[in-house]
Image (spheres, helix red, strand yellow):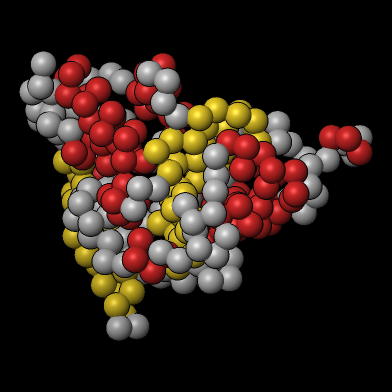
Amino acid sequence: MAEIAAWLTQRQIVADLQRLGVAAGQVLMVHSSVRAIGPIIGGPNTIIQALLDALTPTGTLMMYVGWEEAPTDIGDWPAAVQALFHDACPPYDPRTSRAVRAHGILVECFRTWPGVMRSEHPDCSMAAWGAQAAWLTADHPLLYGYGPGSPLQKLCAARGYVLMLGAPLDTITLLHYAEHMAQLPNKRIKRYTCPVLRGGQKVWVELEEYDTSDTVIDAAYQFDTIAEAYLATGKGRKSLVGRAQSYLFEAADLAQFGAQWLERRFGFVK
């Protein structure tokens, strides 16, 4: 067991968040690494409550949830496997479908938190709590779920923020919105089907999105490179939350910077 001085409390995490710039009334999207923060009395629940305390009920907390069972590559599978999944794969249900494990334990804890709402896109789903949760998660487009009308676009419209709570900078989901908005040649498009719950019945729906499995064009870049270039301009804030190096970004400004960064290197704008 860690020494007593190593343990973090909810009060300490709230103070660290406020020092970084998290404040009452903000709309805040969070990516996190619980392990990076350090030993916490109360575990992940303490982190969520600290975030909600810092935001207060006038604010809104959002996380990228996704769906662990989303068959996004079903079109590449053998016909027999596709047939099996069409028959047996459960439909996406915003109330019960599990978050993507790779997004971390905090996301699944948040998904099941009292009062949390979740968008209906089976692959790009977002969960939110607070004053603007219903608006953020409503009417999530099935076509281009990181683009206009998405929770990411709404986060920018609300002058919201992105908090990287010990999470690596190459996991900033908001930059998929920048990829969508950037004027880039020959963006790769991915089309696939997913089962969703409609009227109590399973229905397979067609989805379409720019292919975010690597980069949306045939060029090599990483999201952390974009984020570090943004920080180098003097924008963004950096501080420890617990033991975790954390960053706070203005969502709309980072998205615009990311789109322009991509266009300067790979797009039509020189």
Quadrant holding the C terminus? top left
Quadrant holding the N terminus? top right
Picture layout, residue 191 above or below residue 19: below
**Residue in view at x 31 percent, y 40 percent:** 252
Residue 103 image point, x, y percent: 51, 45
**Residue in view at x 31 percent, y 20 percent:** 221
Residue 180 image point, x, y percent: 21, 40
Residue 131 image point, x, y percent: 45, 66
Q: Is residue 160 visible?
A: yes
Q: Is residue 87 visible?
A: no
Q: Is residue 183 left or right of residue 194?
A: left
Residue closest to the eye, 77 or 111: 111
Residue 33 image point, x, y percent: 60, 39
Q: Is residue 18 left or right of residue 199?
A: right
Query: Residue 17 appears in which quarter of the rendering?
Result: top right
**Residue in view at x 27 percent, y 41 percent:** 177
Tally of numbered tags: 0
Query: Residue 220 appears in which quarter of the rendering?
Result: top left
Residue closest to the eye, 84 or 57: 57
Picture layout, residue 234 above or below residue 118: above
**Residue in view at x 33 percent, y 74 percent:** 197
Q: Is residue 200 left or right of residue 267?
A: right
Residue closest to the eye, 136 or 68: 136
Residue closest to the eye, 74 or 13: 13
Picture layout, residue 10 above or below residue 4: below
Q: Is residue 36 left or right of residue 160?
A: right
